[in-house]
Image (cartoon, coloured by chain):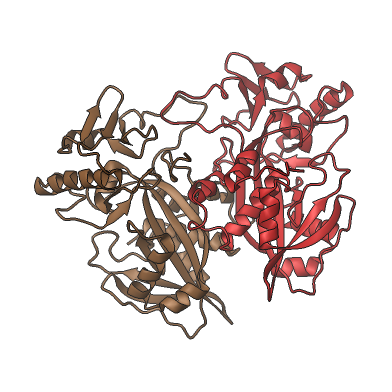
Chain colours: A brown, B red
């Protein structure tokens, strides 16, 4: 819940989230790359995942997968290739089932999770959320910040996560946040989660929400994320704003949220500096404070660095190939 | 002025602006790096500029500069080092004066230009605008988009550049745009330029303008930029929005702007697709359209790629070192 004595800078908070090393073009490539296997879908030459050597060794690979230790590549080439829109997802499901049956990985914690689309694949393919981290596949989330302009200035609706959650218990969070499930778009995810997490009506969310961009980063799984350490988690989070009147109250509607606070900007900044926010929700809040002119180049010397770091170009495709 | 038959995508427009190659972590470093000399200020180990080999050969270096062809470095170590806050700027001025006297470079076109601060230097240092491109030093600009919400939807004030300008004549541009001069902050630049270019009062600009972030890219100078081709131009542009009432009219106030149009969103998009905007102003407009929910992940498949490419992490420092 944050060390009372520590005070994190905005750049510290970015570093906590985007913690896979950056390469220096004037130096030889860092050896963080040398132990990574590229995960490939069929004949697609573009890697779709970054798998740790330790995962390659532990994974109970099925016959659908070929491991090439020479070129450090994992190829998924389904034995049954009749219909690509089914066969890749099926092969991945079989692999995950085996890993669950054999209880191979702590990050899966012995159960299935919701299917996530593999971004940038040339055909529909999906993989379960926690397994996607083992394969280093891009995860997609969507976050909505709900705020209101009052006489005393802007205030932001900030939930505290339940102490019972597996990941980031008790941390502060974005007003509404969720993973984008296979088959839905980011905005549909927001509409679903806004009702589930904050009791916001679909009508209002559809009418007044503004899409404002996305952030991207490569995180390494740590103890607060749960499971194996150091898994590579390339992530894109679609960002939305919703301005509401002072009459609208965000209320918890499921057991993932403990309670909601209506914080002014200084309270939000103090909670950031104390490290109270979930790692990626801190970055979403920094993005919000930049877009609304609270953090500026005049009051933050690392402004340009922060903007670049929040929008990392992932080394994996985010759109299908133009054919 | 754009090929009438061509239709550029948003990603094409980003590629036109951010056209220095990106490195692929799974391949050896591209040879675009091998011919680049790093420009260093004194004992600072961080490079502050990226100089082409062709520029190193042509430049009439003074005794303040040491060229190390082995390590491919240019070191500025002023002979007179009494006061760092003066000596580096003075040494650079002497170099540029010599290049002007000898008419060495087309990009300088035989005249002085306004001083730009060297971003991230540990002491105040500046270099003339056009010479900064020869040394591959980060340039800083500031762009303000002025818009109004009408019954027919949002409209944006778009100027057309004068046909007499040295760079990007006749192109469409951001409402207000300028280079950040040494000694001023980005917002002060906006206030100055808003009066000069669009007849907007300082009072209104100070009161209602919102800082919303910055874009960053590495451009290679081309024919529309004027002068030597291929110069490396790492750039940061601070981005501002100003919403005005329908009663406010942007009018040209100097000879850099030919005329102003009040365009609706579809007119702006069509002008972008026709390639009518100045290269970096097109990117500023794409950023605006993303932040205002016009371009979304639902209608643009390269959304995540565009967001990352508009916010490139520069291989040069953007803040002084923490000491």
A310 horizontally vs B180: left or right: left
The location of residue A115, given as percent across then percent down, is 27, 55
Q: Residue at x 25, y 41 (%)?
A: A82
Q: Is residue B213 above or below residue A322?
A: below
Whether residue A169 is visible: yes
Q: Is residue B55 above or below residue A281?
A: above
Q: Residue at x 28, y 42 (%)?
A: A135
Q: Residue furthest top?
A: B70
Q: Quadrant of residue B205?
A: bottom right
The location of residue B224, given as percent across then percent down, is 76, 36
Q: Residue furthest front?
A: A82
Q: Is residue B99 above or below residue B117?
A: above
Image quarter in which the N terminus of chain A is found: bottom left
Q: Nearer the viewer, residue B118 or B15?
A: B15
Whether residue A296 is visible: no
Q: Nearer the viewer, residue A125 or B254?
A: A125
Q: How many marks?
A: 0
The location of residue B134, given as percent across then percent down, is 73, 29
Q: Quadrant of residue B120?
A: top right
The location of residue A279, given as percent across then percent down, is 38, 56
Q: Quadrant of residue A184?
A: bottom left
Q: Is residue B319 above or below residue A267?
A: above
Q: Nearer the viewer, residue A9 or B102?
A: B102
């Amino acid at each position: 819940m944050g060390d009372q004595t520590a005070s994190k800078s905005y750049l510290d908070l970015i570093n906590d989230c985007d913690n896979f090393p950056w390469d220096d073009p004037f130096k030889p490539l860092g050896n963080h790359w040398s132990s990574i296997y590229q995960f490939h879908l069929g004949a697609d030459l573009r890697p779709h995942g970054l798998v740790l050597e330790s995962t390659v060794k532990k994974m109970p690979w099925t016959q659908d997968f070929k491991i090439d230790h020479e070129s450090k590549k994992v190829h998924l080439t389904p034995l049954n290739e009749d219909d690509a829109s089914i066969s890749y997802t099926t092969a991945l499901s079989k692999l995950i089932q085996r890993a669950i049956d054999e209880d191979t990985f702590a990050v899966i914690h012995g159960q299935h999770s919701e299917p996530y689309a593999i971004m940038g694949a040339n055909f529909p393919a999906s993989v379960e959320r926690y397994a996607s981290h083992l394969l280093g596949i891009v995860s997609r989330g969507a976050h909505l910040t709900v705020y209101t302009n009052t006489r005393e200035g802007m205030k932001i609706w900030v939930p505290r996560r339940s102490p019972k959650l597996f990941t980031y218990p008790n941390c502060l969070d974005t007003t509404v946040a969720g993973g984008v499930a296979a088959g839905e778009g980011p905005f549909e995810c927001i509409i679903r989660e806004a009702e589930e997490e904050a009791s916001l009506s679909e009508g209002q969310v559809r009418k007044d929400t503004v899409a404002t961009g996305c952030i991207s980063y490569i995180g390494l799984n740590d103890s607060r994320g749960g499971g194996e350490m150091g898994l590579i988690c390339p992530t894109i989070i679609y960002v939305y704003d919703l301005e509401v009147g002072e009459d609208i109250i965000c209320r918890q509607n499921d057991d993932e949220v403990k309670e909601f606070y209506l914080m002014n900007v200084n309270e939000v900044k103090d909670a950031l500096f104390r490290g109270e926010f979930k790692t990626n929700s801190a970055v979403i809040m920094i993005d919000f404070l930049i877009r609304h002119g609270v953090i500026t180049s005049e009051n933050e010397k690392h402004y340009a660095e922060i903007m670049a770091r929040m929008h990392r170009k992932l080394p994996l495709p985010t759109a299908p190939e133009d054919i």
